[in-house]
Amino acid sequence: MTDVLAPLLGLAGVADAVKAAQDAVFAVHRHPANLRGASATAAEASVRAARASAAIEGADPEIPADAAVTDPVLAGALRVAESLESLLPTWRRAPRQALARMQVLAAADLVSDPETLGRPRAGAADRLDLLAQLVTGGTSVPGALLAAVVHGELLALRAFGAGDGVVARAAARLTMVATGVDPKSLTVPEVACLRQSRRYRDAAAGFATGEPAGVREWLLFCCEALEKGAHEARGIAQAAG
């Protein structure tokens, strides 16, 4: 079968950007704090990622010190973040099931009819099936590139109608873990996406057009965000000692 993502590596600068991003992530995994045990740094990365992901959607990212989280988007993002480790096996074999579960968690407080949770809208099935095929072995491109495609496609598709942005970013994290690029889920590219939110949205819109220039800009942005996410992870590791 033809690898439909392989031509993306031929877009100007993409192969180099992918390598630079993956090298930055690999370096973080070799940090002494992460070699001794990465559970604490991974937990902090997970919370930072969830907060940034919620903030991208306009939520208040602050977690109350002495009260429950009341912002529905932040609460959903935190629920999704807590679920990712347990969802990894499902993501590897049945990505659509994992996406549905993540959307239930992300949007539980956002919809009036709970019967709609986890159910993609009409017309989204074919593209979700294609994405699932790529995630389950339908491509041999580097993990950072596949994660960017998963992220961009889910943003463009808006398959569920609620919580889609949070789900897209979480799916990208799962892809990074599943492909072995970020097996301990230490990086926090979501922070870079938040800090450059206008560019993030513009690049996502460009990817959604399917035009080579727009797709290239999105891939380059995602690789840059991943590099910056690795720097964020280094800061977490250094603080952990």
Image: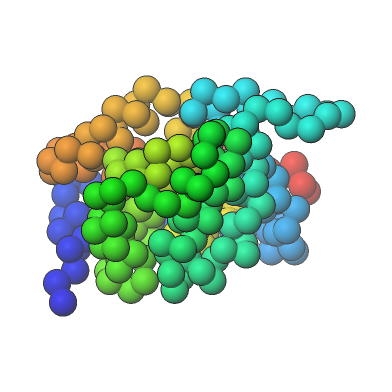
Farthest residue to the bottom: give it: 1
Residue in view at x 75 percent, y 42 percent: 239
* Residue 143 in picture, x, y percent from top left: 38, 61
Residue 91 position, x and y percent, is 47, 65
Measured along the vertical axis of the image, is residue 152 above or below residue 57? below
Residue 68 seen in render:
yes
> Which residue lies most toward the right here?
66
Q: Is residue 88 left or right of residue 146?
A: right
Query: In percent of the image, x 62 and y 31: which residue is there?
Result: 72
> Residue 205: x and y, percent?
26, 32
In this figure, what is the number of numbered marks?
0
**90 vs 154: above or below:** below
Quadrant assignment, res 217: top left
Q: Residue at left 73%, top 58%?
A: 39
Is 65 situated above or below 12?
A: above
What's the image's color scheme? Answer: rainbow
**Occupied quadrant, residue 225:** top left
